[in-house]
Amino acid sequence: MNWEAFWLTVRLAAIVSALLVAIGIPIAYWLTYSRWRWKFLVEAAVALPIVLPPTVLGFFVLVALGSRSPLGRWWESLTGHTLAFTFEGLVIGSLLYSLPFAVQPFAASFGAVDRTLLQASASLGHSPLQTFRRIVLPLSQAGLITGFALSFAHTLGEFGVVLMVGGNIPGVTRTLSIDIYDQVQAANYSSANRTALFLLVVSFFILSIVFGLNRYGLNRRTWALSPWR
Amino acid sequence: MNKLNRLLALLLLFAGTFATAQEITVAAAADMSAALPQLVDAYTKRTGQTVKLAFGASGNLTNQIRNGAPFDVFLSADEEFPQQLIAEGLAAKETLYRYAVGRLVLWVPNDSPLDLSKLGMNALLDLSVKKISIANPATAPYGRAAAAALRHFGIYDQVASRLVIGENISQAAQFVESGNAQAGLVALSHALAPAMKDKGRYWQVPLDAYPPLNQAAVVLSKSKQQDAARRFLQFLSSPEARSVLAQYGFTLTAGKPSMGEIMK
């Protein structure tokens, strides 16, 4: 088991899923409450990473954000290096890659909040933002945790983007999935096996939490009725 | 009438499967990615034999062959991997044959300020070189050669933190061609290929700096088309094929670089 790759992967997934909570909530809010007639186009754009091959994202990060593009040059003048082969590059690639896995659960849970509660809140003088903070967010806890956990798990399993833009640098861009790939290619099956099994268990654990949460919620009384206690 | 059409369509479908049964599949080292399609075009025109190509790092391909990949011919970038396959009974020993000798070059894009002819390998110590792309030494013979050359010049430790590792030599070339790395240790065949030729300059790493890249081909034991596979290997030694390989800097002996290569 390559612990350096493990901690790197966990750090990547934690940063990406935390950023996605920050970015995803406003996007999901807008998607839920906007009445713009072309909203479906934005919804389609947000869902794109689910269907696009990771190689497309990798290609864009590598070429469109490379040192030959205006955007890449701007980034280089700002930071002194290009996005490829850096941890920041992986973060940006993963943000795009995992975006729908955060935004869609957020938007679904916001949309499930009873609208009469929102109307009651408004009639009592709350601004839409206050209503969102005091009514919608607390009632959407399960959706928020689901979005966070799914984007975390999805980033753990990211491979194509990292293979294309990472450059396989130990401690910087060699994530667990790349480590497994390298071990398999070098025919170190027992080492690949350990890491693969570990990822399998961790991913299963995260997904069980997500599904358990959606089944029984955060409410203590329903948890008490759950089969696990 | 409709029934007849359907029958015809069915027949055509079967005709299609019979045609593909004669196809051979060649697994080739990534440094052949520009030269081999050209060779195959010529071969297909001459013989009607269709050839499918799969490129990758020689080590990766070897591993795929071990796990039953349906290839007929293996063109490695070294001699070791084919020999391992022979030892494991997966390749036919009598077909082992050196089809080319590869060359490692240091490549920089046109906008690089570095004077390679003056600096040679020491160009990599320049501060403008933030990333240096090489192929993965664990699976790609060119990666192994690159690491050996860096050690030969005694600069491996100084540049180690700036190395970025391509999955195979084509990806290493792509990293530097796209400008994401500022220098790369790539295959001469890539430097001479149309995709990179006018985009940068290169310096040939001296042959004594790394173990020779003697590239060997072999027919795989599990191939169901032994004759077709052997015929394709024979073609690689024909004058026609040799002249194509020479265009991409592949020689048969690890001799001195030709005049044209020095001029570059």
Image (tube, coloured by chain):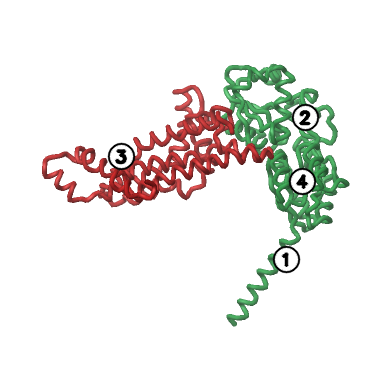
Crowding near the residue tagged with mark 4, few <14, some 14–19, many ≥20 C-alpha atoms within 10 Å: many
Q: Residue at x 61, y 77 (%)?
A: B5
Give the quarter of the image for residue B17. Answer: bottom right
State the separation of the CA atoms marked 1 and 3.
58 Å
| Foreground disc of the pair 3, 2 | 3
Q: Chain of mark 3?
A: A
**Label 2 vs label 4, nearer the camera:** 4
Q: Which residue is mark 1?
A: B18
Quarter location, residue A99: top left
How many residues crowd around disc 1 within 10 Å: few (fewer than 14), some, or many (20 or more)? few
Tag 1 and tag 4, C-beta contact below 8 Å? no
Given residues B220 and B68, the one toward you in this image is B68
Q: Where is mark 2, residue-wise?
A: B260
Tag 3's secondary structure?
Answer: helix
Mark 3 lies on residue: A26
- Residue beneath disc 4: B74
Q: Are marks 4 and 3 on the same chain?
A: no
Say which chain is green: B
First of labels 2, 4 by sequence position = 4
Subunit of mark 1?
B
The residue that appears at 79% across and 25% down in the rendered structure is B207
Q: What is the spatial separation of the Cα atoms under label 1 and label 4, in whole angstroms?
A: 24 Å
Asked whether residue A45 is in view, the answer is no
* Amino acid tagged 1: Phe
Q: Rate crowding at label 2 as few (under 14), some (14 to 19) or many (20 or more) other CA atoms within 10 Å.
A: few
Q: Are marks 1 and 3 in contact (CB under 8 Å)?
A: no
Instruction: Report the chain holding disc 4.
Output: B
CA gap, disc 2 and disc 4:
30 Å
Measured as percent of width and height from the top left, residue B134 is found at 65, 30
The residue depicted at 14 percent of the width and 44 percent of the height is A122
Q: From this viewpoint, which residue is outermost toward the right? A: B94
Query: In the image, residue A92 lies at what x, y percent?
Result: 45, 34
